[in-house]
Image (cartoon, helix red, strand yellow):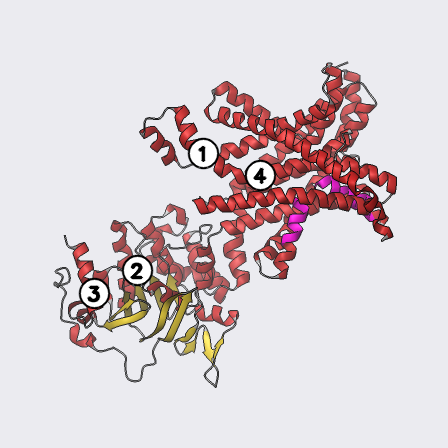
Amino acid sequence: MKTFMPLINSYWYLFRGAGMTLMMAGTAVIPATLLGLLIAIAQIFGGRVSRSAIVTYLFVVRGIPLLVLLTFVYYLLPLTGIDLPPFWGVVLVLSVYYAAFMSEVFRAGILSLPRAQWDAAKSLGMTRHQMLQIVIFPQALRLAAPPFVSLCANLVKATSLVSIVGLWELTMASREVVERTLAPFQIFLAAAVLYFCICYSIAAYGKYLERRILVGH
Amino acid sequence: MLFDPNFIARLIPALLEGAEVTVELAVLTFLICLVWGLPVALMQAMRGPVAWIAGSYVQIVRNTPLLIQMYLIYFGLSMVGVPLSGFASGLLALCLQNGGYVAEIYRGGLQAVSARQYEAGRALGMRPWTLYTSVILPQMVARVIPPLTNQAISITKDTSQVAAIAVMDVMKISQVWVESSANTYDVFLGVALIYLTLTTIVSLVGRFAEQRLAFAA
Amino acid sequence: MGNTLNDVSLSATDSLATAPLGVNARPMLEMSGIAKSFGTNQVLRGVSLTVAKGEAVVVIGPSGSGKTTLLRCINMLEDYEQGTVSVDGEPVGYALDRAGKRLRMGERDIAAAREKIGIVFQSYNLFPHMTVLKNITAAPIRVKGVPRAKAEVRARDLLAMVGLSEKENAYPVNLSGGQQQRVAIARALAMDPKIMLFDEVTSALDPELVGEVLAAMQQLARDGMTMIVVTHEMSFARDVADRIVFMDGGVIVEEGAPDQLFFAPRTDRVRQFLKRYNDRYRI
């Protein structure tokens, strides 16, 4: 019983941290998704300039750790004179970073549609806009749903890194509790369980979607 | 001051020293995961409690943040009497987590081999060992190289998180230099270039392996 | 009666009208009382079939009649609930103990029994990561322990037999369906099976490629290979079979020599089937 005293005294603090983690991931996922979609469309249909700009962006973002970007936005933003609250700075980095991976998921969804679908839409006299809206997106987004959901779970895990640059969420909360209670094993285990509950639920939802889509086909 | 030559001359050797630790961690993690993922994947393909244990392991490591796993091992294990160095803790956490991902990659590769291939092998009187070593695994290898390359890139980037448990990798060294100097831009550029170089090398090696190991398809 | 089968030569009828089982010859294949269900769907309802050494038996019948399942039960690619199979006098999937109780054989023994049974699938199922030659030699070398050089000599002989000598270093993906299927036949033969099973091997092929595969099978039958062929190719059945077995609803409805079955079927079910077949293919 004594082993778990630190946990009993601090569980509410950890729950609040988990709430902050969810809020951070939930806020970042919206711009990340929109930006990701935009990038996917621009990469498939855009001109040469926008495409090479995107390729460069993808190359840089996928080649550099998120932690590097977070750390340097944390140090660089004050230098640029932009007065952005840390929360929004972090949301900005997370969105820009995850948009790259989101765009891959959407692009794969769009490109994996059989050619026959495009041909059928064209043969019905649809404009490109109509084709995308009526035929392509509804199917592509369905295909992209399962990997999209697992990216969301990934994003939740990634928010733990913001604790390294001093923002408060579940990981930071657990570190604070550990410093107070000197019980790292119990507290970090509890934090891991909280993360697991969040991510596993999200992933399970993705599995459910995947099964439903497979049945649909 | 941006691009201070004296500063850069002192910075580069320091960063390269850190890069050595990063490369060591990444290579060790990848090689260990390459081996460790296979029994996990094969266990998942079995039935009964063995599959359940392997499946739970994969779910647990995939749905909790690497950073929390590192804290749990670095701070938690030393509390219960198993002190590990930062490097060892980081390596262990990296292997545990990425081993789960690599197992999933192997599992996907195994599932992608058609049931008819198993059947054709069995119809020729092959026993499981021969069936797997001469028919199934060679086909799996060709399929898993692209996702394994992505995983290797992800591992390279993930190693940056050992900075949080006081390992002097390139990330940690850059943090130290940023805090002790005003040349944030230089440090950022240096660190970004190092990670970009490493991840580019990984993806080139992956592409080479893909070309060599893909059978005429 | 349908026109398409009228031009068949009747000269062989007398010798084949009775089962060609010699009095003393041990049958090459003996199946008795095979019953098999997928869930609640009973696919085989007690099928018994005996095939003599060197005999070519062609199984015909409507789709869903259990023909393919029957073949797959012979080498235990499908497990079955009742009945036993033996090849050349030795049990394949289940052995009977002294009290006559069915005992499932160990995986090792089943694998060993499968060496004696060659099967060719509708979808070829070649190993895509191996060259044609490797496809043929892999099992002899790894399963039977045949020395590589010897296995390759034999493989080249077989390739010559199916007319693909120049393709030994090609990969399956670069072959036509007909060529892949001929390699599959050679691969099965390389194990020196005592019996060959053909499961609708021409159904996935373009019409112009069917002939080359059937020709290889015909050659095999002429050379005295014991074989069971599930097919929809009626003229092949007529030309090559020593005996035709008609299956429907998981049982053997009628069996007999080709001329008897095609021209004087004893059951209405066969008559209907042939009529529908002829109506569809009459030009």
Secondary structure state at the residue bearing disc 3: helix
Q: Which mark is residue B175?
A: none
Is disc 1 placed on a helix, strand or loop? helix
Q: Nearer the viewer, residue B6 or A15?
A: A15
The residue closer to the viewer here, B63 or B75, is: B63
- The stretch drawn in magenta includes residue A67: no
- The residue wearing badge 1 is A138
Q: Which residue is depicted at the point 58% across and 60% down? A: B47
Q: Amino acid at mark 3?
A: Arg
Instruction: Indicate the chain on which mark 3 is placed.
Output: C
Q: Are circles 2 and 3 on residues that touch, CB within 8 Å?
A: no
Q: Position of residue B172 (x, y in %)?
A: 78, 31
**Image-based side of B54 in relation to B22, left or right:** left
Left or right: where C129 falls relative to C209: right
**Amino acid type indicated by mark 4:** Val
User: Above or below — where is B131 with respect to C254?
Assistant: above
The percent coordinates of residue A154 (x first, y second) are: 64, 38
* Badge 3 density bin: few <14, some 14–19, many ≥20, Cα 10 Å: many
Rendered image: mark on residue C238: 3
Query: Which is closer to the viewer, label 3 or label 4?
Result: 4
Judge if badges 2 and 1 mark residues of a common chain. Answer: no
The tag on residue C63 is 2
Q: How far apart in space, not on screen, are marks 2 and 1 (Cα)?
A: 37 Å
Is residue B60 found inside the magenta-colored segment of the image?
yes
In this rendering, the label closer to the viewer, 2 or 3 = 2
Which of the two labelled residues, at mark 4 and mark 1, occupies the earlier sequence position?
1
Tell me which segment is drawn in magenta: B55-77
Query: Which label is found at residue A149?
Result: 4
Evaluate if marks 4 and 1 touch, with contact meaning CB atoms under 8 Å apart: no
- Residue at (57%, 29%) from the top-left corner? A33
